Amino acid sequence: EAHSINLLPLLKKQWGTDRLQYLQQIGNIAQQLGTPVYLVGGAVRDLFLERYAPDLDVAVEGDVRSLVEACKAQIPGTDYQYHARFGTATLQDSRGFSLDLAQCRVEHYPAPAALPEVRPGNIGEDLIRRDFTINAMALSLDPENFASLLDPYGGRIDLQRGQLRTLHSRSFLDDPTRILRGLRFATRFQMNLAPESRQQLQEALRDDIFARLSAARLWREICYLLELVALPQALSLLSEWHLWFLLRPAPMDILAMQALLGRGQEQIQWLQQQFPEVSIAVSTLMLILLWQDLSWTDIQRPLDQWPIPDRNRLEADLRILPDLPRRIAQAIRPSQRANIWQACSLAGILAAMAMYPDDRALKDSARLYLQEQKSLQPIFNGQELQALGLSAGPSLGNILKRLRDAQLDRDIADKETAQQWLIKQGILPTNPR
Ligand code: CTP
């Protein structure tokens, strides 16, 4: 049954002709070489889900390099990059289509959570080494039966039934990142773990499988999770799958945390509207929110274990945040408030707005800081101050800082008032010149 289904109509409907023609060209060239090729993985799954697949993966039952060389020779405007270490390649054509190719392979895991040893295999072997049945479907690119579906493990039915099913009982032990991948798929596509896969998850957790995973690999998966738009929903699943400990070393009130993370996402949206060109470390912001109420002893371990970028900044933010509303409330002058915000990272500022949604004064001053104060143009720069007769050195930095504060407090507005102010402060002599 599985072999009789042809997805050409679906491909045409969803992709239009250009992308399709490109795949057909590759299929024709592969046929000349006698090398079977298949579209595999997420792209096939997304076809059934009627979602546009951004990345195309092609599995090659044979030599990848000869195939991409032939493609470059025969398709005008096509070029490739060959990655000798992995035997994989990327093809790009002049219209901007790109495609990842890998030789079909068999995987053997020498130990739980270790990286697999691989050797060349056929398409059936390449499909069964994968994470879930929904990702283990292939479309033939052979011109004789172009777009016919290969679905040996029932991925299509599982997709229809919303069942996330592993391909064998050791799957999660072999590669625990699949558990978090599964969580992402379950969240994005609103699927459930199949009963036997749920059993396997429990066994893997009993084996403390995540302890065997390298920190770098775990961290990468955690980041994907933190960056999900549906992170609040993923949190419910994380709790249901008994995985909350991965994100947070202490239990949490899931509902309250979902609301908090949701508010963090709203702040990101606000920021993106205001400053489309500014990029923000979403994962850092979400970590701050997930950890803001924990003690240092609790978060020391994940902080030490994970390769968190800018870990010192994250720590600084976590130290500042609890006391922030009191300090902002007590700050009298605009410069005092600006200096409080200046000690926070951008993620920290957004976190504060999410954490204290009812603190109007805090939010106003945070937004004022981001919108105006942060990028305030100084009235005098260091060179100009030296031209006025001040000497270079640390004291000049201090004067620049005081000028900035005075400007924030609107004690000065332009070069003239700034100069008078410098005189009044005794920084410049009464009569310059
Ligand atoms: N894969 C796997 N085990 C992993 C990682 C990947 O079996 N630990 C397989 C899956 O079959 C997956 C394919 O490799 O379909 C490609 O992986 P990736 O590009 O990460 O995911 P996609 O399925 O393409 O999903 P996404 O929509 O997230 O890109």
Image (cartoon, grey):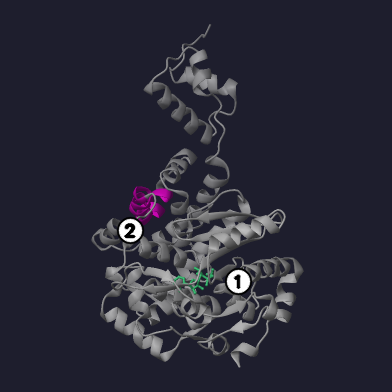
| Predominant SS of the magenta segment | helix
Q: Is residue 209 above or below residue 413?
A: below
Q: Which residue is mark 2?
A: 306
Please provide percent x and percent y for residue 341.
45, 46
Three-letter code, disc 1: Gly
Q: Which residue is mark 1?
A: 34
Q: Quadrant of residue 111?
A: bottom left
Secondary element at tag 2 = loop
Q: Is residue 94 above or below residue 183?
A: above
The residue that appears at 31% across and 80% down in the rendered structure is 204
Q: Quadrant of the N terminus?
A: bottom right
Which one is nearer the viewer's eye here, 337 or 48?
Answer: 48
Q: Is residue 349 above or below residue 358?
A: above
Q: Is residue 409 visible?
A: no
Please provide percent x and percent y for residue 13.
74, 76
Identify the residue at the far right of this view.
Answer: 17
- Mark 1 Cα within 10 Å, few/some/many (few <14, many 20+)? few
Residue 325 drawn in magenta: yes
Which one is nearer the viewer's eye here, 34 or 28?
Answer: 34
Residue 343 drawn in magenta: no
Q: Is residue 427 visible?
A: yes
Ligand 1 lies under 8 Å from the Cβ of mark 2: no
Q: Is residue 110 left or right of residue 78?
A: left
Q: Please give the range of residues in magenta.
A: 311-329
The residue that appears at 35% across and 56% down in the rendered structure is 322
The residue that appears at 35% across and 60% down in the rendered structure is 216
Three-letter code, disc 2: Trp
Q: Is residue 330 left or right of residue 91?
A: left
Mark 2 or mark 1: name the one nearer the start of the chain: 1
Secondary element at tag 1 = loop
